[in-house]
Amino acid sequence: MAVAGATGYAGVEVVRLLSAHPGVELTTLTSEQYHGRPMAEVFPFLRGRIGQTLERLDPAAIADKARTVVTALPHGKSATFVAELLDRGCRVLDLSAELQNVGTQGARLGALAEGTLAECADATLTRLAPSPNLQAFNNYNGNDVTDCGGPCRQFDGDQAGCAGAYTVTQAGATSCFFHRGLCLPCVGCGQKQGACTNACSTLEYPPTTCGDATRTKFAGGPGTESCYRIRSQTLCESAWHIGRNARPANCYWTGNSCAGCGIRNEFTQNDCTNTCTSVPALTCKNAALTVTQRCSDFNGDQTGCEGAWHGANHDGTAASCFWDATQSRCRGCALRHEFPGSCTNTCL
């Protein structure tokens, strides 16, 4: 777990609480003011509890080391940063009020946070509001379904109530299902184990099959960290999953962990080949641009940035890079930047 803005009033309190929790490992703490200094040097009361050195705010570096991120950033910084973390597959707990904005950018971020299927296809089901008294949504850990939480759990012991409800996770809308007295969200908890069918989705689940006959294990669907949860190389190399773009993709072994061979890893990182389905190689119609793995490689180089494109969008499209003058950095012109008018994607 990471805490972004760890030295602010809210951030340091989060660090204090999490450092005392036996089930939490803090991997990254950031601070723009104190980066490079040990957290316990800035806050001596944390000596003996926190050994991390504070780092700069870098979404890529954070996502490499943490699946869950608590953001406690100054007003005006959360929106873009949270969107980048979501695009990289992180779960985010944001402590600001910034993402409550009902404007264009707020609507886009809300769609990212809830997934692309926030509405339930079954109109007879009632959407449940989040409850502060219920455990946050967690994915099925392969051993015990009781770690699956969220609003569905208010119907534990009530099969009829459970059958009439749905909730929204980062994978989208998911119907609740009843299992051994517990009311659980289908996506993540039951679906990848074959225990339920998501009534909120108009797609079959899995919506297709992997074209590679050697891939016999279905790991899971969008938002379930399906491949990442596999710890065995043998199992990893026999598994496949459905990515956020609804395409099937094989899992692959990186050398020390299991990952999904989605658009980003196949075409942008060149780490794998998707043996489940043939996806046309990404191209940019702007012939003047040169492909790059990450637009952020051109941070500090505006000329290089404006001459590059990448293919990291989860929907499988190419995007030109653009220079963000407000932060002096190079970004990809994905929808979250193009939609509010920060850039124009010249690749499409």
Image: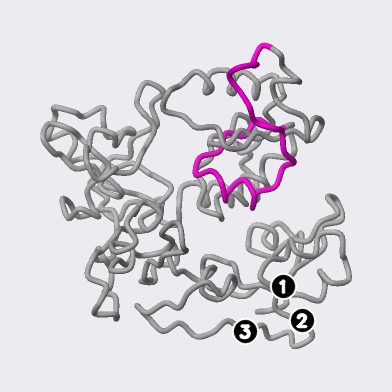
Q: Residue at x 44, y 67 (%)?
A: 245
Quadrant of the rendered structure where residue 70 is? top right
Question: Can you identify the residue that label 1 sits on?
Answer: 320
Q: Position of residue 262 (x, y in %)?
A: 46, 69
Local crowd at mark 3 within 10 Å, few (<14), some, or many (≥20)? some
Give the residues in magenta.
Answer: 45-73
Q: Amino acid at mark 2?
A: Leu
Does residue 127 sit above or below 335 in this rendering? above
Residue 289's label in the rendered image is: 2
Above or below 28: residue 204? below
Q: Local crowd at mark 2 within 10 Å, few (<14), some, or many (≥20)?
A: some
Say what secondary structure mark 3 lies in. loop
- Measured along the vertical axis of the image, is residue 160 above or below residue 42? below
Q: What residue sits 50% from the left and 52% below the top? A: 89
Whichever of callouts 3 and 2 sits on the residue coming sooner in the sequence is 3
Please give the name of the residue rendered at 46% of the width and 21% of the height, measured from the top-left corner: 21
Residue 46 in the figure: left or right of residue 261:
right
Give the distance between the C-alpha atoms of the residues marked 1 and 3, in whole angstroms. 11 Å
